[in-house]
Image (cartoon, grey):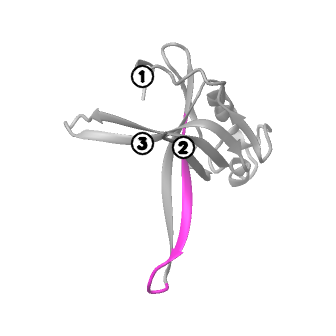
Amino acid sequence: MSLNKMLVIGNLGGDPEMRYTSGGVPVTSFSVATNRRYTTASGEQRDETEWFRVSAWRQLAEQCNQFLSKGRQVYVEGRLNTSTWQAQDGQNRTSLEITADRVVFLSGGGGDQQGGQGGRGDQGGPQGGQGYQSDPPAGPPPPDDAEDLPW
């Protein structure tokens, strides 16, 4: 038996970006920052931030694009995926990304950070604690589907 499951609670680093595959499947990408405060051996307090790239597919992608905004706190549950490619300089590159199965909107941070003016945080939408899950398991998109993404 094996398990590939990621659980992350953090804040969006920017507004989500939604794209469509060549087959018309919506995909939304966003980044989530987590923070950790610790004390060094010398007694100094330090903050550490980790960034996670997240992608949501299909109906979950549409919901994330509609209701999430920069600064909003979210709970993301999904699986970790690895992508490897060769960069223009010839070096092999590797990227880790969470493919979300579930996203829970914990706060409306976007509207608060923008002083309630404009921005996606003022669209109403779900209140804190509202969550969405991906469509019933239809399996992941075919591997070649991901190659058609424009980013």
Looking at the picture, how far across and down is residue 131, in whole percent? 73, 39
Answer with left or right where residue 17 lies relative to residue 91: right
Q: Residues within 10 Å of mark 2 (few under 14, many from 20)?
A: few
Q: Range of the magenta residues?
A: 29-43
Which circle marks residue 5 in the picture? 2
Query: What residue sits right under mark 3 in the picture?
Result: 96
Residue topped by disc 1? 143
Q: Amino acid at mark 3?
A: Leu
The CA span between labels 3 and 2 is 13 Å
Residue 136 lies in the magenta-colored region: no
Q: At 77% across and 46% down in the image, what residue appears?
A: 129
Identify the mark nearer the N-term, 3 or 2. Answer: 2
Q: Label 1 sits on what residue type?
A: Pro
Furthest residue to the front? 1
Relative to 57, residue 116 above or below: below
Q: Secondary structure at mark 3?
A: strand
Question: Would you identify the image quadrant in which residue 118 lies?
Answer: top right
Would residue 149 be found to the left or right of residue 104 on screen? left
Residue 1 position (above or below residue 148): below
Tell me, yes or no, if residue 119 can be seen here.
Answer: no
- What residue is at 42 percent from the left and 42 percent from the top? 96
